[in-house]
Amino acid sequence: MTVGIGVTGATGRMGQEVIAAVADHDDCEVAFAVNREPDGEAVDGVEIEPAAEFDSLVVERDPTVVIDFTGPESALGYAEACVDADVAFVTGTTGFDDDQLESLEAAADEIPLLHAPNFARGVQALVNVVGEAVRNLPGYDVELVETHHNGKRDAPSGTANRLLDEIEANGEFTERTHGREGDQPREGPEIGVHALRAGDVTGEHEILLAGNHEEVRLTHRAEDRGVFAAGAVDAAVWIAGQKAGRYDFTDVIGQ
Ligand SMILES: NC(=O)C1=CN([C@@H]2O[C@H](COP(=O)(O)OP(=O)(O)OC[C@H]3O[C@@H](n4cnc5c(N)ncnc54)[C@H](OP(=O)(O)O)[C@@H]3O)[C@@H](O)[C@H]2O)C=CC1
Ligand SMILES: O=C(O)C1=N[C@H](C(=O)O)C[C@H](O)C1
């Protein structure tokens, strides 16, 4: 069965990668691709249609799944339209606030929905090991540094927030300190969080654990955005056969 995919944010950094990743996948095809004010553009030979027509396209072209990498407000709007059309929704968009996340997750009562802040398999491995490292090194200081391109809007990154949840899970760390300035020595239960924005860095996350005259650094570096797009397309193919519910990238890759 060929999985028809609707792509949002199609001329964005990730949207273009998703169109390329769908073309590379034997079991998928682009059902439609939208962006705000497309102006007759095409990406890899796929015509880009106006985002204002999403609600009708998602009914008329009848995709199995929509893949979204846009922004929190638009992602929520697209998810709601997918609920109305009974189409599965995979989103890698980050930067949702708590209310927005709650609304997004409500859509999972009606359709299969997968939200992942990072579709790189290596990041999921990092999420798995970071909690173990913190548990193995009680009393060590923990700091997180993430680096992204200068066009990224949200900070810290969605991946950083996911890693921080994992670091905090055993209760030793209870506060996040976002950068430091002036007379601000480190306090016991804090995790320092530092977001760097420069050039076209694809995405790097490093957790530093230091104490006992030693340090451990756990680092993931994405070398190409195609890795995120390929993961999202794998997620779309996987979710095509699922019933309504909230899914995670771990469900797709079995970690
Ligand atoms: N989960 C993962 O693995 C990854 C997640 N991301 C996340 O994906 C998202 C997009 O990243 P990226 O592609 O770099 O961003 P870009 O800014 O390059 O692209 C965003 C796209 O979404 C469109 N868009 C933004 N807001 C709206 C809106 N309100 N209505 C309709 N369209 C909208 C933009 O349209 P326009 O051109 O008109 O502005 C643009 O085409 C971010 O949240 C980012 O953090 C990124 C990489 C990997
Ligand atoms: O905006 C990006 O580029 C990325 N965003 C995601 C995030 O916020 O974690 C994933 C990846 O790091 C790239």
Image (tube, rainbow, N blue to C red):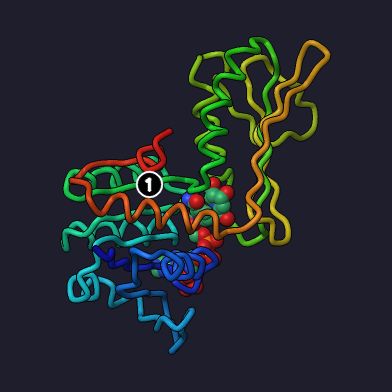
Q: Which residue matches tag 1?
A: 115
Residue 74 coordinates in the image, percent (x, y): 37, 62
Ligand 1 lies under 8 Å from the Cβ of mark 1: no
Q: Can residue 107 be seen in this view?
A: no
When asked about the image quadrant of residue 8, the answer is bottom left
**Horizontally, is 27 left or right of 230 in the view?**
left
Q: Quadrant of residue 132?
A: top right
Location of residue 34 with respect to 207 vertically, above or below: below
Q: In which quarter of the image is the N terminus?
A: bottom left
Left or right: residue 185 versus residue 76 is right
Please report the residue visible at 24 percent of the width from the left and 67 percent of the height from the top: 63
Task: Report the residue at 25% width, 54% height from top.
Answer: 240
Q: Is 174 located above or below residue 198 in the figure?
A: above
Q: In which quarter of the image is the C terminus?
A: top left
Secondary structure beneath dot 1 equals strand
- The residue at the point 28 percent across, 72 percent down is 54
Whole-percent x, y for residue 133 in the image: 61, 19
Above or below, comparing residue 79 to residue 172 in the picture: below
Residue type at mark 1? His
In front of the other: 170 or 237:
237
Position of 63 with respect to 166 (left or right) is left
Furthest residue toward right: 213
x, y percentage for residue 27? 33, 63
Give the image quarter of residue 13.
bottom right
Residue 44 picture location, percent across and down: 48, 79
Label 1 packing within 10 angstroms: few (<14), some (14-19), many (20+)? many
At horizontal 83% and vertical 13% (from top left) the residue drawn is: 213
Q: Is residue 133 left or right of residue 249?
A: right
